[in-house]
Amino acid sequence: MRFRDIRGRICAELACVNITAVWITAAICAALGVVSFSWSGMSRVPYVYAPRAFWVGLFFLLFWALIGASLALVLFSGKGAYRQYPCLLFVCALLLSYAWQPVVYRGASFFLGALLCAVCAVCLFFLSSVIRKRFFLSAAGAFLGALWLLYVLYYTIALAFLNG
């Protein structure tokens, strides 16, 4: 696709979406992520090779806001009944990603954390391929979120080997 075509699709999608609702949904998803992050006990991590809690929290906060904005773009667009299953997959991906930090940092269950990341990343990759034609911006957000979760999967496996 050419840049002009991509820009035209983005402008056409944003024209029929309530931007305030997108910001509010992204903020709610990020706030729920902050609650999950604070409950996980990340600040008291006993692991030797773990990045600072600030960086992990910041990137997860951006991830949750991105997935929340992608969810809102699908939810509040005027594109009919097609949005039911993508919204369900976005909510499942959010819930699985909220569960990752308490599982890894509080429960020290690296295998379950890796499984959560893998399932969530596959869900987001599948979602980005399914909704690419109708919801271009949401598909891009889901794809970026899936890439972040692949890094988190690598990070979880590395924590298991280095601190196991």
Image (tube, grey):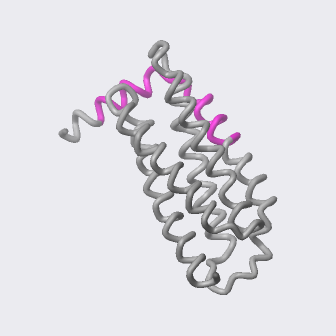
* Residue span colored magenta: 7-28
Q: Residue 145, relative to residue 8: is it above or below?
A: below
**Residue projecting furthest to the left:** 2
* Left or right position of 16 against 11: right
Question: Residue at 68% of width from left, 51% of height from top?
Answer: 98
Question: Residue at 67% of width from left, 47% of height from top?
Answer: 30
Question: Residue at 53% of width from left, 77% of height from top?
Answer: 158
Of 90 and 23, nearer the camera is 90
Q: Residue 132's spot in the image, x, y percent?
A: 35, 33
- Quarter of the figure with residue 22: top right
> Looking at the rendering, in which quadrant would you find the C terminus?
bottom right
- Quarter of the figure with residue 100: bottom right
Of 88 and 161, nearer the camera is 161
Question: Residue at 50% of width from left, 55% of height from top?
Answer: 118
* Magenta stretch encompasses residue 1: no
Q: Residue 18's spot in the image, x, y percent?
A: 55, 24
* Magenta stretch encompasses residue 10: yes
Q: Residue 59's spot in the image, x, y percent?
A: 58, 61
Marks counted in the figure total: 0
Q: Residue 28, relative to residue 155: is it above or below?
A: above
Q: Residue 147, relative to residue 95: is it above or below?
A: below
**Residue projecting furthest to the top:** 80
Of 131 and 59, nearer the camera is 131
Q: Residue 6's spot in the image, x, y percent?
A: 27, 36
> Looking at the rendering, in which quadrant would you find the N terminus?
top left
Of 76 and 93, nearer the camera is 93
Magenta: predominant secondary structure element? helix
